[in-house]
Structures are given as C-alpha cells and as structure tokens.
Image: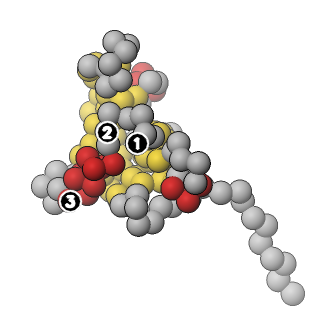
Amino acid sequence: MTCILFWNPEISAFTKDEFKECISNLDLDNTISWNVWEYKKLESGQRVFLMRCGSDNPKENGIVLSGYFYGEAYKGKDWSGKNRRTYYADAEIEMIIDPDLSLIHISEPTRPEPIS
C-alpha cells in the first residue's frame, strides 16, 4: 500500500526553511519523521509520498518528497500543541524537491490524442 502524507507549510510546525535544511543535509541524514494518523496500517518498506498543500496557487501544491517507511510508528509529542495523541513514522528519503523550484503536480488526467 502507498501512503500520501500532507504538508501545509502555513500551519505546520515543519517550516519551509526546515524543509530546505533537510535538502541541504541529505548527504548526512536521508531520513525524515512525520506524524501519521493511521499508524496501525503502516508497514516497514511501505512507499510514502509527501504532498505540499494549502496554497491558493495550484503551482505551489504538489509532491515534494518520496521514500519508504522503516520500522514501526511510535508515539510522540503533538506538533500542533493541541495535546492530541500523535504518532510518528520514520521514512528513508528517496527523492526530495525544493518546493520553490519545481514540484510534481497532481492534475486532472487527460485523454491521449488518437493515433491516426
């Protein structure tokens, strides 16, 4: 099963600057921890994508990271400060994109042109 996680830098405790720092330090640490709500469904080796969302400009929304979960989800402090029960999972980063340069966009599927 594939998992899509969402990141809205406008409300997330994980800022765009921290995301860019993650890109800069990829040679030293190619892992990321992210909160997951359906933690019981996660499996080590499961494919994961991180999608930036929340912008009114559709060109600013899209896939910014892909990787694979490893290990099991674990309980941690609620990043939002709302004191909710929060679980995190670690993922090994396979691909990461600077959100200010280019994103992989999710769009309406288009029909291929007929071949004549």
Residue contact between numbered discs 2 and 1, judged by CB atoms under 8 Å: yes
Q: Which mark is residue 14?
A: 2
In this image, 112 relative to 27: left or right? right
On the image, the x and y values in percent for residue 94 come to 33, 56
Q: From the image, tell me which residue sits under label 1.
A: 9
Quarter of the image that includes the C terminus: bottom right
Q: Which mark is residue 97?
A: none
- Please name whichever residue, 43 or 57, is drawn nearer the observer in this view of the structure: 57
Q: Residues within 10 Å of mark 1 (few under 14, many from 20)?
A: some
Q: Amino acid at mark 1?
A: Pro
Residue at 27 percent of width and 33 percent of height: 71
**Quadrant hosting residue 20:** bottom left
Relative image position of residue 55 (x, y in whole percent): 53, 47
| Whole-percent x, y for residue 6 in the image | 47, 39
The CA span between labels 3 and 2 is: 15 Å
Residue, far bottom? 116
Q: Residues within 10 Å of mark 2 (few under 14, many from 20)?
A: some
- Within-10-Å neighbours for mark 3: few <14, some 14–19, many 20+: few
Give the SS element for disc 3.
helix
For the residue labelled by badge 1, is the local secondary structure a helix, a strand or a loop? Answer: loop
Q: Of the two numbered discs 3 and 2 on the same chain, state the one appearing first in sequence.
A: 2
